[in-house]
Amino acid sequence: MTDKAELIKIAAELAMCKNMPSPFFDDWNFPKYMSYKQRCMIVGEAAIAESQCREWSVRIREIANNL
């Protein structure tokens, strides 16, 4: 596989947020004793991580296109 193809593959995996925590409450099995504030904090951090992955995906794709 060429370097360009490998970069595009990585960009696609980042765009899909492969193996990243879900930013949706329903995807988590939070214990009932966990406070709503803690749940929101965890889901919020997961949403930030997803956003960062998508940003990196765009940047990597741009690099691959310039090769």
Image (tube, rainbow, N blue to C red):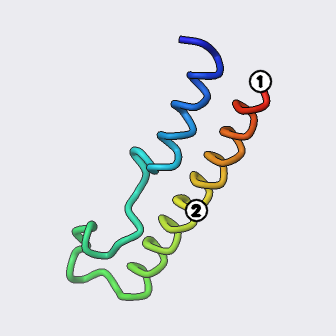
- Residue for badge 2: 51
Residue beneath the point at 61% across and 28% down = 7
Asked where in the image residue 10 lies, by quadrant, the reply is: top right
Residue 67 got which mark? Answer: 1
- Check the image and name the residue furthest to the top: 1
In the rendered image, the vertical position of residue 25 relative to residue 67, given as above or below: below
Residue beneath the point at 58% across and 62% down = 51
In the rendered image, the vertical position of residue 17 relative to residue 47, given as above or below: above
Q: Amino acid at mark 1?
A: Leu
Asked if the residues shown at circle 1 and circle 2 are in contact, with their CB atoms under 8 angstroms apart, the answer is: no
Residue beneath the point at 50% across and 74% down = 44
Q: Amino acid at mark 2?
A: Ser
Task: Answer few, some or many: residues within 10 Å of disc 2's Cα (few below 14, many 20 plus, some between 14 and 19).
Answer: some
Asked where in the image residue 25 lies, by quadrant, the reply is: bottom left
Q: Quadrant of the C terminus?
A: top right
Residue beneath the point at 57% across and 39% down = 11
Q: Nearer the viewer, residue 67 or 50?
A: 67
Q: Position of residue 32 (x, y in %)?
A: 20, 82
